[in-house]
Image (spheres, rainbow, N blue to C red):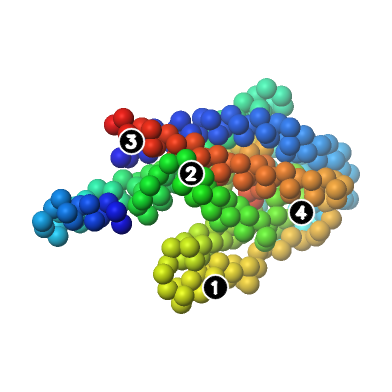
Amino acid sequence: MSNLSKAATRSTSISGVEAQAGSRIVPALFAVAFGLFLFIGTGFAAPSLIHNATHDTRHSLGLPCH
Amino acid sequence: MFKTIILSAFGAGLAVGIALSVVQAVTTEPLILHAETFENAEPAPAAAAAPHEHSTTEAHAHEAAAPEAAPAHQHDEDAWSPADGFERSAYTLLANLLMGVGVSAVLLGLMSIRGGKIDARTGVLWGVAGFFAASLLPSLGLSPELPGTAAAEVTSRQVWWLSTVAASAIGLALIVFSGSWLLKAAGLVIGVLPHVIGAPVPPTLEASYPAGLGGEFVAASLVVSALLWALSGLFSGWLYQRLSRTA
């Protein structure tokens, strides 16, 4: 919320506030999507090749395996 | 900001991946290899108790005995797999690095969406919360398994696991961040719901390895998961703060 209030003092228009929040949240959502892609690709992907390469990591982290 | 998050995630992932591999080498890995000796030595009749078989000759022996347990055999014996020893350890290290980068990117992304300070201290708090949501609570329904553990079909378990992670994360966020008691109560209900529905049930509780080995592994696995999440939060929060100061 501090970023939002800072933006409000800098910008006189409401659209300026929205742009500030959007410039923070959109890249953050991309980062979450990228992280989930790596997490699910490594920990859950079905192909035997990926499963066999990541087998011990999946077991170690208690993820459903086999 | 996206660049700072990704750079921090890769830096943290590198450190976490190496640290995790060292810890695994002396905790979970010896237990996995030990369990595999029982699994590979298992005679064909007992295979029904453990629908999970590595040896080529007995690979499909259990399918007739436990068709519901494993309709889709996950072990394609012709598929490539890393050779035991250095190659296997190298791929485990690579997988750990990817996990470290992934978890760090998720944590930094969520912290940015929430807003507020991002540093080593807040990072480790988010990391511990991530461990609760993505490891500890799901393990109540599906406890960490050694190779050779009987279990329900893998896709149903993965769906339950990921749904439980989502419900736990939403529930935890409502409990921690919401100002209203009604929403906090709703968070509690959402967090408990997957356990009321219940995880896919294994066809048998018999296992090819001694029970004590399984108990040791559950504890070791949870410690490794806690380290993955806490260290990812710690390192990525610290790096993010440093990189965004110089940027």
Circle 2 is placed at which residue position? Answer: B121
Could you tell me residue B149's position as x and y percent? 77, 50
Q: Residue at x 38, y 37 (%)?
A: B241
* Contact? badges 4 and 2 (CB < 8 Å): no
Could you tell me residue B110's position as x and y percent? 41, 51
Q: Earlier in the sequence, mark 2 or mark 1?
A: 2
* Residue sitting nearer the eye, B221 or B45: B221
Quadrant into which the N terminus of chain A falls:
bottom left
Q: Chain of mark 1?
A: B
Could you tell me the amino acid type at mark 4? Ala
Q: Nearer the viewer, mark 3 or mark 1?
A: 3
* Contact? badges 3 and 1 (CB < 8 Å): no
Circle 4 is placed at which residue position? Answer: B150
Q: CA distance from mark 3 to mark 1?
A: 38 Å
Q: Residue at x 62, y 59 (%)?
A: B137
Q: CA distance from mark 4 to mark 2?
A: 40 Å
Q: Earlier in the sequence, mark 3 or mark 2?
A: 2
Q: Chain of mark 2?
A: B
* Residue sitting nearer the eye, B129 or B196: B129
Could you tell me residue B238's position as x and y percent? 45, 36
Q: Earlier in the sequence, mark 4 or mark 2?
A: 2
Q: Is residue B154 above or below residue B186?
A: above
Circle 3 is placed at which residue position? Answer: B244
* Contact? badges 4 and 1 (CB < 8 Å): no
Q: Is residue B21 above or below residue B216?
A: above
